[in-house]
Amino acid sequence: MGVANTMNYLKAAFWDYPQFTDETTLRSCLRERKDTSLYFWLMGRFLENARVVDTLNFFAIEEIAGQLSKLKLRPYTRKKWIRMVEIYGTPSGK
């Protein structure tokens, strides 16, 4: 098994919270805690620290767009995600 197969991409967002580095546990938590402060905290951690591709694996771009103004994010992160929503958030750029 190569290095790429053993890397845990969730550690980029949750290096200090090992309980969230297990994908099954994380998905279960997101499902059970939908629309709670924990859910939005997890979303913020993804937006701040995870790769875009990994973030979009857990959250729909429309959901992110709806929360951007409510989440506590660094200015750079907010700007980056506003741009992501502009590019990928609406069909045919409308």
Image: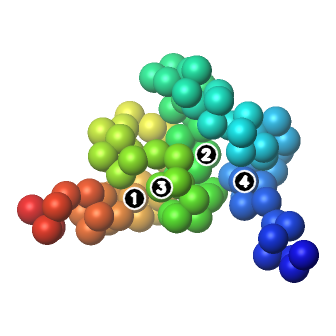
Q: Which of the two labelled residues, at mark 1 and mark 4, occupies the earlier sequence position?
A: 4
- For marks 4 and 2, give the CA distance: 10 Å
Which residue reaches farthest left?
Answer: 94
Q: Which of the two labelled residues, at mark 2 and mark 3, occupies the earlier sequence position?
A: 2
Circle 1 Cα neighbour tier, 10 Å, few/some/many (<14 / 14–19 / ≥20)? some
Looking at the image, which is closer to me, 37 or 75?
37
Q: In this view, does 24 lie to the left or right of 1?
A: left
Q: Mark 2 points at which residue?
A: 45
Q: Name the residue under label 3.
A: 56
Q: Mark 1 points at which residue?
A: 81
Circle 4 Cα neighbour tier, 10 Å, few/some/many (<14 / 14–19 / ≥20)? many
Q: Is residue 56 left or right of residue 10?
A: left
Q: Name the residue under label 4.
A: 10
**Which type of secondary structure does the marked residue at label 3 adopt?**
helix
Q: Which of the two labelled residues, at mark 4 and mark 2, occupies the earlier sequence position?
A: 4
Foreground: disc 2 or disc 3: 3
Q: Residue 73 carries which label?
A: none
Report the amino acid beneath label 2.
Answer: Arg
- Residue 32: x percent and y percent? 58, 21
- For marks 3 and 1, give the CA distance: 11 Å
- Residue 88: x percent and y percent? 29, 64
**Which type of secondary structure does the marked residue at label 4 adopt?**
loop
- For marks 2 and 3, give the CA distance: 13 Å
Residue in the image at 14% along x and 68% along y: 92
- Residue 63: x percent and y percent? 35, 41
Q: Which of the two labelled residues, at mark 2 and mark 1, occupies the earlier sequence position?
A: 2
Camera sees residue 92: yes
